[in-house]
Image (cartoon, helix red, strand yellow):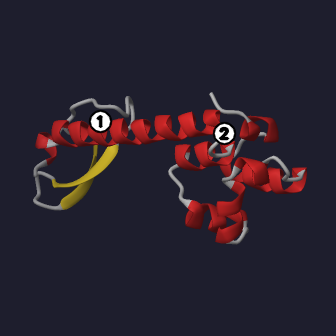
Amino acid sequence: MEKKDVPQDHGIYGQWHGICYVTDENGEYVRSKSSGWEPLNIANGIAWEFINEDLAGILKKVKKGELSPLAYHMNKNMMDAKVLSQYSGFARWRVNRHLKPRAFNKLDDEVLKRYASVFNITIEQLKETP
């Protein structure tokens, strides 16, 4: 693709710009900013619809008391128990245990602080869901 042909189809990212590698007028490869490409924008939009549906389902389970608020924040940040385990330093089995409301409600502030720091939120925000 030549530099003059770089797509500029604004998408879900607003002012976000991606980088494309294109050829310039001398035939050399250079980087060029793009504000989006319609097929990519459509695919990303569909993916976000699925992500938001999953998050809504998890939120319902949290409100019913089937999952802890940790499950909501974990999924909102697109993490699974393995990834959260790596970021928090807790064993995966402990993260899975903390997804249960009964275990989560017994956690002390030091444990909650570690989780909150992973999500860059306060302990109070960690305990809440929208």
Q: Nearer the viewer, mark 1 or mark 2?
A: 2
Residue 114's image quarter?
Answer: bottom right
Label 2: how many Cα within 10 Å (few below 14, some 14–19, many 20+): few
Residue type (three-letter) at the residue carrying disc 2:
Gly
Residue type (three-letter) at the residue carrying disc 1:
Gly
Q: How far across and down, in percent of the image, does residue 8 sit?
A: 21, 34
Classify mark 2: helix, strand or loop.
Answer: loop
Residue 40's image quarter?
Answer: top left
Q: How far across and down, in percent of the image, does residue 51 sit?
A: 40, 42
Which callout, 1 or 2, points at the residue further toward the start of the chain?
1
In the shown orientation, is residue 63 left or right of residue 45? Answer: right
Rendered image: mark on residue 65 = 2
Classify mark 1: helix, strand or loop.
Answer: helix
Asked if labels 2 and 1 touch by Cβ distance under 8 angstroms, the answer is no
Q: Is residue 112 above or below residue 43?
A: below
Q: How far across and down, in percent of the image, does residue 57 sit?
A: 48, 38
Residue 73's image quarter?
Answer: top right
Q: Residue at x 43, y 42 (%)?
A: 54
Rendered image: mark on residue 105 = none
- Relative depth, front residue between 14 and 60: 60
Q: How far across and down, in percent of the image, does residue 111 sit?
A: 83, 57
Q: What residue is shown with label 1?
A: 45
Image quarter where the C terminus lies is top right
